[in-house]
Image (cartoon, rainbow, N blue to C red):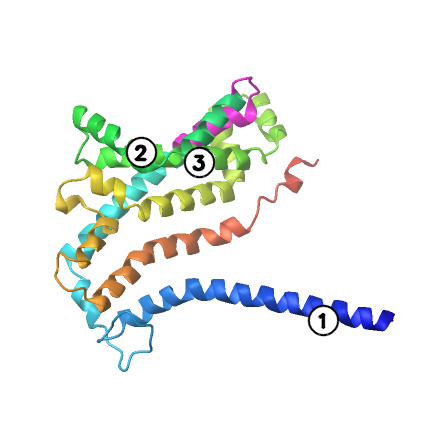
């Protein structure tokens, strides 16, 4: 009966493959349907909560939201907050990860575990003391204060990522630079960071995306409406303007997602290129 067993095994494998494919399709549909609703509703003059192909295409929803008050000012605020926070996060993460990667100390592991614990703290649990502290030091309702907190909230995980990427850069390259008289800071800037470009890109994209979609932090720390980023101003479509205009909400969502998509496209090639350090330590 070997032939019967072989057929049975093939049948089981086929059933398992079909079950796995069906599960993947269900997961894909869960992601695709909301995205399809956003794109289709942005072009639908009679958009509602249903996912459907519009009877007629229109750009009126985009015309309605492309104003300084609704879109341009919040997007500019978001770019300032997230761009400044990302820059500060990447710089501080590189400076913190370098000694953890290059120098051995008995305090490295406890420090990394403390950093890992800090990533587990829910942001809502610390906002009350942070708010009180910002009021005391006159950082409440300021862009720079929000940038500082954005960077501080993303820094623990950014340090972990940066260190892991930095460990992949051969130490021999730095030793050669030290022999030529370079300092540790010069070797970090001129050798390590350029060689770990994909790692820096990953930390940049991760930090920027996490800040870009953050609603709670700017909602708590910023009070002036003119300083609110797009992640907070999108809430105005749900109540402050009366009935929800789904077409305009979808159009704003498309515009709001564009900077993140562009950032990903710009760095995707560099991230996918790998480190290519194999020949750097030969000869």
Disc on res. 11: 1
Mark 2: secondary structure:
helix
Task: Tell me residue 137's x, y (percent).
Answer: 19, 24
**Residue 98 tag number:** none
Q: Are marks 2 and 3 in contact (CB under 8 Å)?
A: no
The secondary structure type at the circle numbered 3 is helix
For numbered disc 1, what is the local secondary structure?
helix
Q: Residues within 10 Å of mark 1 (few under 14, many from 20)?
A: few
Segment colored magenta? 91-107
Nearer the viewer's eye, disc 2 or disc 1?
A: 1
Q: Is residue 59 above or below residue 119?
A: below
Q: Is residue 169 left or right of residue 224?
A: right
In the image, is residue 57 part of the stretch drawn in magenta? no
Residue furthest to the top in view is 106
* 107 relative position to 211: left or right: right
Report how far apart the C-alphas of labels 1 and 3 lie in the structure: 45 Å
Residue under pointer 2 = 125
In the displayed structure image, the side of residue 175 where residue 229 appears, left or right = left
Comes first in the chain, label 1 or label 3 = 1
Q: Are marks 2 and 1 in contact (CB under 8 Å)?
A: no
From this view, report whether residue 65 is shown above or below residue 95.
Answer: below
Where's residue 118, x and y in %? 41, 30
Residue visible at 28% across and 57% down in the picture = 256
Out of 117 and 187, give the one closest to the viewer.
Answer: 117
Q: What residue is shown with label 3?
A: 157
The outermost residue toward the bottom is 55
Q: CA distance from mark 2 to mark 1?
A: 52 Å
**Quadrant of image for the C terminus:** top right
Q: Give the mark nearest the N terminus, 2 or 3.
A: 2
In this rendering, the label closer to the viewer, 2 or 3: 2
């Amino acid at each position: 009966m070997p032939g019967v067993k072989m057929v049975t095994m093939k049948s089981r494998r086929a059933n398992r493959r079909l079950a796995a494919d069906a599960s993947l399709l269900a997961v894909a549909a869960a992601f695709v349907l909301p995205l399809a609703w956003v794109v289709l509703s942005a072009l639908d003059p009679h958009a509602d909560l249903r996912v459907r192909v519009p009877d007629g295409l229109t750009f009126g929803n985009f015309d309605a939201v492309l104003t300084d008050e609704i879109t341009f000012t919040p997007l500019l605020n978001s770019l300032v907050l997230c761009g400044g926070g990302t820059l500060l996060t990447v710089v501080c993460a590189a400076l913190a990860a370098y000694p953890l990667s290059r120098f051995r100390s008995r305090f490295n592991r406890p420090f990394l575990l403390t950093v890992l614990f800090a990533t587990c703290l829910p942001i809502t649990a610390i906002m009350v003391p942070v708010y009180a502290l910002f009021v005391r030091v006159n950082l409440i309702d300021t862009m720079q204060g929000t940038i500082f907190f954005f960077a501080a909230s993303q820094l623990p995980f950014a340090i972990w990522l940066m260190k892991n990427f930095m460990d992949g850069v051969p130490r021999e390259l730095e030793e050669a630079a030290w022999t030529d008289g370079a300092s540790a800071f010069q070797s970090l800037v001129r050798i390590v960071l350029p060689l770990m470009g994909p790692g820096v890109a990953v930390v940049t994209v991760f930090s920027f995306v996490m800040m870009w979609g953050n609603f709670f932090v700017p909602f708590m720390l910023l009070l002036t409406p003119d300083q609110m980023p797009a992640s907070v101003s999108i809430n105005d479509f749900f109540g402050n303007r009366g009935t929800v205009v789904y077409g305009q909400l979808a159009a704003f969502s498309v515009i709001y997602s564009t900077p993140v998509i562009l950032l990903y496209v710009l760095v995707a090639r560099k991230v996918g290129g790998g480190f290519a350090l194999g020949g750097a330590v030969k000869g």
